[in-house]
Image: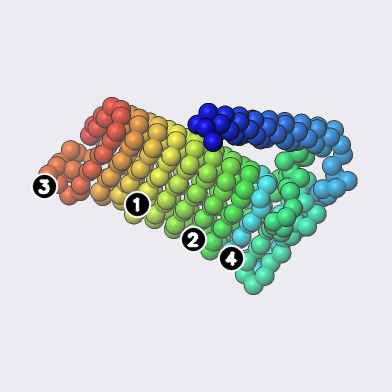
Amino acid sequence: MSDKYYSEQEEIRTKAQKSSSGKVIIIGLVLFLIGLVLTTIGGFICHNTDMNKYYKTADFDNTFSVSDVKNISVDIDNCDIIFKKSLDKDIKVTARSVPEDYKAAVTGDTLTISVPKPKRTQISMTLFIDFDPRIEVALPEKDYEKLNVIGGVGDIDLSDLKFNDVVYNTGTGDNKINNLTCKNMEIINGVGDNEFTNITCESCKLTAGTGDLEVININAAKELRIESGVGDTEMTGAKLGGLYIETGTGDTDFAGTVNGDIYVEAGTGDIDIALTNPESDFASNGKYTMTIEKGVGEKNITYNN
């Protein structure tokens, strides 16, 4: 057959392929729009429907003997949590608007507060429900062993307590700790601001993904270690046995005393370090070493403040 024939056939096939591709794109866009509309309608229906008919919440009040408890473990996906000092002789746990399957119980020497995780096939209805879950844990004065908190979404507030170890691993929410005495403190928070005031410990490690981090009046006999992704980091009134800071984006400000090595690594942002130490502490033949690695931003280091 002639070249003209083959050329015409190739042109026909090309047009068919383009037509088929165009139809696939159109079908994809239509399905996307349908999904968007259904999601919007579903959200509207959930928002304007009494979802408590389907997602049950309840209030709980629990009392436990303080003599039975050394450790506290909390594992809840969506809830604001408050830990505070109590003048009562017993531990009191108050829960409001929490899921019906909420549990608070003492096993061995550990007070466990939790809500069972949903099955993988379930869709969390909390995305569409307007409610305010809240748990308050009132603790009589005592030197407790360990506080372990695993949280998804919610603010956490702790004040005026003593533990040997404090460990947080939270997703989204603000963290506030005030007047805490402990041996070891390790906080991991994905998204949210972090404020720590009047902390006395041996070692402290703070990890923040996105959000500002403020530390006021911390006494860490060993080391304060900070790792931050995006957000400003500010430390004032610090007395440390060592300082390690690693930040991505944001300003870094430090004011205090460091009787140990200093390491600061910053990507983008200004670095301002105001030490009470004499400059001789960090000289080439001084007692301690100082290493500053920075990308974009100004650097200012002063002594004898």
Give the CA distance from mark 4 to mark 1. 26 Å
Q: Amino acid at mark 3?
A: Asn
Residue 97 badge: none
Task: Please name the residue that numbered disc 3 is placed on.
Answer: 285
Neighbour class for label 1 at 10 Å: few (<14), some, many (≥20)? many
Image quadrant holding the N terminus, namely top right
Question: Disc 3 or 4, which lies upstream in sequence?
Answer: 4
Q: Amino acid at mark 2?
A: Asn
Colour approach in the figure: rainbow
Give the CA distance from mark 2 to mark 1. 16 Å
Residue 17 appears in which quarter of the rendering? Answer: top right
Give the CA distance from mark 2 to mark 4. 10 Å
Task: Please name the residue that numbered disc 4 is placed on.
Answer: 70
Secondary structure at badge 4 equals loop
Q: Which residue is at the far front?
A: 1
The reply, left or right, for residue 180 in relation to residue 22 is left
The correct choice, above or below, for 144 with respect to 242 in the image is below
| Circle 1/circle 3 CB separation < 8 Å | no
Question: Disc 2 or 1, which lies upstream in sequence?
Answer: 2
Residue 164 badge: 2
Give the CA distance from mark 1 to mark 3. 22 Å
Task: Please name the residue that numbered disc 1 is placed on.
Answer: 223
| Circle 4/circle 1 CB separation < 8 Å | no
Residue 301 appears in which quarter of the rendering? Answer: top left
Question: Disc 1 or 3, which lies upstream in sequence?
Answer: 1
Secondary structure at badge 2 equals strand
